[in-house]
Image: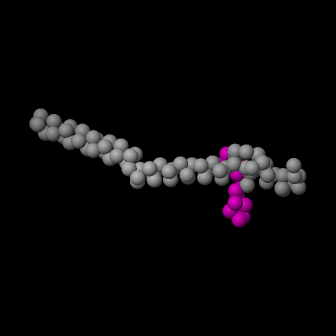
Amino acid sequence: MNAILVESVFFIVLVAVVGAFVLTALGYTPFGTRVKQTVNRRRIERQADLTCPVHGLQREHELVRLTSGEPLCPHCYREALNGHVD
């Protein structure tokens, strides 16, 4: 019985070590670098989409989606709706 438990523990440790090795190796390979760059690019593009050139960074849930699909800052939308342009 003890041998089965010890063998199970060793197998779990082996799986954990191999998983950690694979994740560490991905960080140093060209594929890992590509994944990091893709994640960074998506984060930067998302932040750029949330930034109004006039009013700065906005929260995503506050943006107004136009019929064309383009997001618009709530302040700019309010100004355009009321006819006030600063």
Indicate the quadrant where residue 66 lies. bottom right
Q: Which residue is drawn at 73% across and 49% down?
A: 52
Single out the residue that lies furthest toward the right.
84
- Direction from residue 23 to residue 80 in the image, left or right: right
Would residue 23 be seen by someone viewing this image from the given angle?
no
Tell me if I can see residue 86 in this picture: yes
Q: Is 21 drawn above or below residue 71 in the view shown? A: above
The reply to whether the magenta stretch includes residue 15 is no
Location of residue 62 in the rendering, given as x and y in whole percent from the top left corner: 70, 48
Image height check: is 48 above or below 12?
A: below
Residue at 38% from the left image edge and 46% from the top image edge: 28
Which is nearer the eye, 75 or 47? Answer: 47
Question: Which of 17/7 is in front?
Answer: 17
Q: Is residue 16 left or right of residue 43?
A: left
Identified at 47% across, 49% down, the residue is: 36
Which range of residues does the magenta coloring cover?
59-71
Check the picture and name the quadrant holding the N terminus: top left
Q: Where is residue 82 in the image (x, y as percent from the top left)?
A: 87, 54
